[in-house]
Amino acid sequence: MLNRTKNFLRSFSFRVGLIFFIALSTTLIVLRVQTYYQSLSTTYEDIRALINAHAEEIDQGIEKYGASYAKYLVRAVIDDAHDRRLYLLFRDGKSLYGNLDAWPPDIDPKAVWQEIYIPQGTDKPSVHLLVKFNAYKHKTYTLLVGYDLQRVDLLRDTLLRVAISNILLSLLMSFILSVMVIWLINRHLQRINRACEKVMRGQLQYRVSVRGANDQFDKLGANINGMLDWIATLLGTVKDSTNALAHDMRTPLSRHRLELRALIDDKDIPPKAQEKIRDAVTRVDGIVEMFDNILNIARAESRSGTELFAEINVTETVEDVIEFYAALLEEKALRLIPDIPAWPMRMIGDKQLISQAIVNLLDNAVKYTPRGGQIEVSLRQEREFIIVTIADNGPGIPERFLDKAKERFFRVDESRNTPGTGLGLSLVNAVAGLHHGTLVLEDNHPGLRATLTISTNMAIS
């Protein structure tokens, strides 16, 4: 689960969805914040215009008729405006005229525009005012024009709640749309991945479905289908060539072997010559075996062997291989320690290749384990994988060669004096790949531990 989450977070579709979410949510949030401040700014501008209008009217009256006229003008403006939110206060020395009881102590004489709070007693909240302060030079009087911001405060709170709810809604909508974008991208990519998985499992005829929208995904699917057609053509050519080569090679080799066997049975041939003929037959058998292994490896690596897939009882297969080697184990006085469950472990696969892979692993163990040694064979299942482990206490493989040992024709014995073709482990590795598994070689301290893992989650094509 944790690995799936990490893979999803690193996926292309998640990164695109995340970028889309950030871009869309940021745009919507900026628009909501801009609307909030624009609404407040417009309201403040209207109030400032109203305050300026009354202040200019009183200024003009003072300039024309003097300060004594301002007292009556302030009262007249208050009475005519019929707006209880408008506050005027004219100070001439120590005398105050207007609808404020006292000169606010928080007024900054250096600031023209400012917001102040005027207390209204213990039972009432303070009045929040936006005021304009005018001080007349060389005079003893000042003018204060203000407006109650109660409605503005209510509007601010309302706009803030609306902005927060809109931001949350924007985040939710951005998230939903981002999930839809991720889903759409994954939907298209899954069609391509499904086709690739089918082809890798040997279903070479499978192709990417094209919707006909002629978009980039359709073009990508068409290009992949064209590439798969080309690969299928090449594989068909190779398969036909190898089949023809196999037929052409096996026939003369088999005929040559029969001729050699006939010479062995000829009583006129001296015993020493017969012995050399027997060696030649052995060498021919080795060539045929090597050629069969090469063909099997090619068939497994090309994923063209799934037509032979059927249900396999792996438990029974391992037991049969052990029984086949029972006589040779007894001859070399090797002790076999099996760890095989009593119940059948079943899977879908190529029975002949699976059997050959297990035979190769056990054959290597028997071949290189010294007389009186020990071989362990275990079979277990972990989730959708069946694991076959064969470990011996022979000379093993140097650690630096463990990976190279799975390559074709690789021999630890560079002089190649020991029998073998260097294809056994290569075939096992190819069979593991065909069945979506792995072959792991490890040091058994001493000896070699070979672990063959094959998937049970296979389908019959």
Image: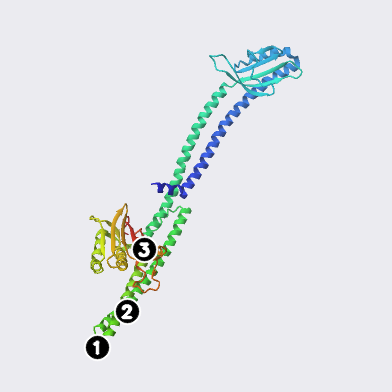
Q: Which residue is mark 3?
A: 429
Q: Amino acid at mark 2?
A: Pro
Q: Secondary structure at mark 3?
A: helix
The tag earlier along the polypeptide, 2 or 3, is 2
State how far apart marks 2 and 1 are (Cα): 25 Å
Question: Quick check: 404 above or below 248?
Answer: above
Disc on the earlier residue, 3 or 1: 1
Cα–Cα gap, marks 2 and 3: 30 Å
Three-letter amino acid code at the position of disc 1:
Asp
Residue 33 or 421: which is nearer the viewer? 421
Pick the residue in front: 447 or 250: 447
Which circle marks residue 202 in the picture? none
Q: Which residue is mark 1?
A: 268
Check if mark 3's residue and mark 1's residue have beta carbons within 8 Å.
Answer: no
Snapshot quadrant of residue 264: bottom left
Q: Secondary structure at mark 1?
A: loop
Where is residue 366 shown, x and y percent of the image?
A: 29, 67
Does residue 416 appear left or right of residue 53 in this picture? Answer: left
Image coords of residue 43 (percent x, y):
60, 26
> Which residue is label 2 attached to?
252
